[in-house]
Image (cartoon, rainbow, N blue to C red):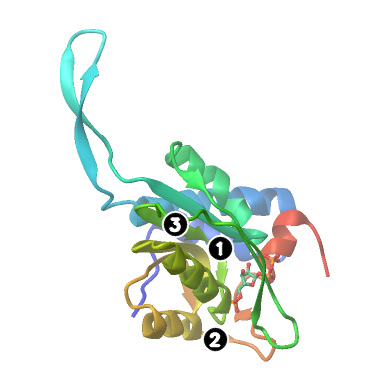
Amino acid sequence: MTSPVQHPLIDHHLGILRDVSTPPALFRQQVHRLASLVAVSATADLPVEETEITTPLTKMSGRKLKPRIGIVPILRAGLGMVDPMQDLLPDAEVWHLGMYRDEETSQPVEYYCKLPEGRPCDVVFILDPMLATGGSVLSAIDALKRWGCQDIRILSLIASRPGTERLEREHADVKLFVAAVDPELNENDFIVPGLGDAGDRIFNTPQ
Ligand code: PRP
């Protein structure tokens, strides 16, 4: 069963993220902060290799990241997590997936997917602050598996328990790193207690 990443800073910043009175500028900062905190766990076992470093005083042996890494934000809300991930992984490739959730059916509708032919990244991080029914993330996983990716990791901020259970059932090989797992979805498939609509709060597009 998926457990959220535990850290006092995550608890603190999640409270501000969830608060309905948090304005868009602060909301975006909270998304950055939380994405960085969750990213520490999501990257903890990345392979490294030896490299020689020359300091102003001497030579020494250091380590550098070995895999070719992909960052895959799901538009729109995933865009809010790209900057902090690129800060931590400056050599990563960024591949975008466009998806929105149909308001009537809650099914994901793909509107942009331009992954390259062949040569899949060694490790890919799907970015989406919300995992509600899980439909959008599952569709992204399908696209990445068609590309040939084997090590797929999801970075999210709030997931629903039904969504994490569906992910575990359908893609047991994909690891989810998330700041909180909320207990339920409401009749409109919104996460409760949740934070509302992350995309609308990041981009200040109230419905
Ligand atoms: C939201 C969210 C996820 C998806 C989660 O996106 O950012 O992508 O819904 O729901 P699911 O797990 O049930 O698929 P939305 O459709 O609101 O698009 P947006 O990011 O453009 O606002």
Question: In the current view of this chain or complex, which residue is farthest to the front?
Answer: 117
Q: What amino acid type is highlighted by mark number 1?
A: Asp
Q: CA distance from mark 1 to mark 3?
A: 10 Å
Residue 79 left/right relative to 169: right
Image depth: mark 3 or mark 2 in front? 3
**Is the N terminus in the top left, top right, bottom left or bottom right quadrant?**
bottom left
Question: In the current view of this chain or complex, which residue is farthest to the right?
Answer: 207
CB at mark 2 closer than 8 A to ligand 1? Answer: no
Q: Residue at x 29, y 52 (%)?
A: 44
**Can you give x and y, in whole percent of width and height, for residue 89 in the image?**
43, 41
Circle 1 residue = 128
Ligand 1 occupies quarter = bottom right
Residue 125's tag is 3
Q: Residue at x 50, y 64 (%)?
A: 156
Q: Quadrant of residue 68?
A: top left
CB at mark 1 closer than 8 A to ligand 1? Answer: yes
Q: Residue at x 56, y 63 (%)?
A: 129
Q: Residue at x 56, y 52 (%)?
A: 81
**Is the C terminus in the top left, top right, bottom left or bottom right quadrant?**
bottom right
